[in-house]
Amino acid sequence: MSPAVLPALDPAFFDAAQTARAWPFEEARKLVKRLEKSGKGEALFETGYGPSGLPHIGTFGEVARTTMVRTAFRLLTRDQVPTRLLCFSDDMDGMRKIPDTVPSKEAMEPHLQKPLTAVPDPWTNEYPSFGEHNNAMLRRFLDTFGFDYEFASATDYYKSGKFDAVLMRAAERYDDIMKVMLPTLGAERQATYSPFLPISPISGRVLYVPMKDVDAKNGMVTFTDEDGRDTTVPVTGGHVKMQWKPDFGMRWAALGVDFEMFGKDHQTNAPIYDKICEILGGKAPEHYVYELFLDSEGQKISKSKGNGLTIDEWLTYASNESLGLYMFQKPRTAKRLHFDVIPRAVDEYYSFIDGYQKQDIATRLENPVFHVHYGAVPTTHMPVTFALLLNLATASNPETPEVMWGYISAYAPGVTPQTHPHLDALVGYAMRYFRDFVQKSYRAPDDVERVALEALSAAFGTLPADADSEAIQNAALDVARGIERYQDHSRTGPNGGPGVSGEFFQMLYQVLIGQERGPRFGSFAALYGIDNSRRLIADALAGKMLAQ
């Protein structure tokens, strides 16, 4: 994806960016107007992270999409306005439950409700705490993708005093904050709610207790500690943290955040975040609410259910660029995120890459790969699609990449793993995806289909060994036009007769490949080879496929 520092932008895009319509530009325009009105000389983008678990595919999506808007903003402002991306970790939150992934749940139980940075690292002695371990995993994760960002720790910001001025203001305007929060709560919660969560001096736990007194002048709060005695602590210096909804608004006010996107599950709370930010003297940032991911059954993805696709799983079968494309496309539409979407995303990515080189400046700004690569689009040619590689793997059952490359080199002379490293990576992805997910389901041909297959094999026998995909496809079409079952009378063939029904090619994939559908059959047969394709037909006619 992008390098570890912001890539330089080509000034040739500056003028065209002013009228670009892709969604990152639409969002960036709101930000340009915001800064023009405020006179602020820097744009601060923020993403939030809860380090109670490891980074996940949603974390990638949020940072990638925010970076897309940041790039669009830089283009709209001709890169004259400094920008920053702050990745903020809410690591002062109390550990509400023990993750299933830890080696010993019993060892973690005494630390429940303590700030995540006060809980020992359960995996190694490398990090001082559970929160710092997960923060390190977040930074490693973001660095892997080359994101340009600054990391921020809630624990550090609270304890170092970076939030002190706004926390003092929160004490002064405590009643105003409560007027916003209480109507959103049930009667029982209203009786015990406080926007301040004190850290118990006795146990070190984050306490969800009501305030008995708020001394706005001195910035002190009094509450009943776990031993039953009233305790008074300052709101500054990390002695308290704020409840998560007020914390959003407080952070925006304290840092001067200009843009933050979040999932639809936050949408109903966004007005609360905004009001609290304004109460505390800030201006609420520009928002972008994206839809949540669904599983293959259309159910909302849940970390606890484990019904989603992890980023490691995606990257086992495809590149991060294909994932970036998936994140770019229709972020405000609920999309199914499961293994079946990967092949399409891969081929769409390379199709957009191929088209990019032929486009003018204005059209390139609408091309998804411009945003996937944050303006630094590589030149890559992919002579074979991922879908074709999957069909090739299905037909050839390769044990090694060299087997796949044998077909590829015969199909495209001069194309090697050395000349096309991206294709070599795609071969590896295709083999893994085929082994793990492709289910073959062959069926026997009926009498009409047997005649069609015999005629197809005979037609292939008249073609030269190096016939291209177009010649092979036309030969197949000629065979189908002569068989009534496959005639489509709503279409007209080149000789004035009926066209060919898609049922013909569906039959070929079902009988020969064991799949319901596939890419253009002529392309597959050209890649697999005419002689190999004829052997495949012979095996199907002999019933050998059904024995697999």
Image: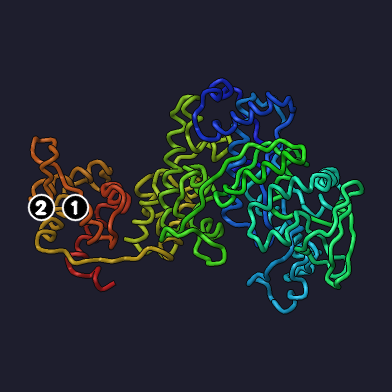
Dot 2 surroundings within 10 Å: few (below 14), some, or many (20 or more)?
Answer: some
User: Can you say whether 205 is above or below 151 in the image?
Assistant: below
Dot 1 amino acid type: Glu
Near-viewer residue (209 or 199): 209
What residue occupies the far top of the structure in this picture?
15
Dot 2 amino acid type: Arg
Near-viewer residue (535 or 297): 297
Dot 1 surroundings within 10 Å: few (below 14), some, or many (20 or more)?
Answer: few
Q: Residue at x 60, y 30 (%)?
A: 30
The residue that label 2 is drawn on is 485
Residue 341 numbered mark, or none: none
Disc 2 + disc 1, Cβ < 8 Å: yes
Q: Residue at x 53, y 56 (%)?
A: 315
The x, y position of residue 107, in whole percent, is: 75, 77
User: Can you say whether 116 is above or below 411 in the image?
Assistant: below
In the figure, is residue 2 to the left or right of 115?
Answer: left
Q: Residue at x 50, y 38 (%)?
A: 369
In the figure, is residue 237 to the left or right of 435?
Answer: right
In the figure, is residue 518 to the left or right of 126?
Answer: left
Q: Earlier in the sequence, mark 2 or mark 1?
A: 2
Residue 167 visible to the viewer? yes
User: Can you say whether 276 is above or below 130 in the image?
Assistant: above
Quarter of image, res 397: bottom left
For numbered disc 1, what is the local secondary structure? helix
The residue that label 1 is drawn on is 503
The x, y position of residue 252, in whole percent, is: 72, 42
The x, y position of residue 390, in whole percent, is: 38, 56
For numbered disc 2, what is the local secondary structure? helix
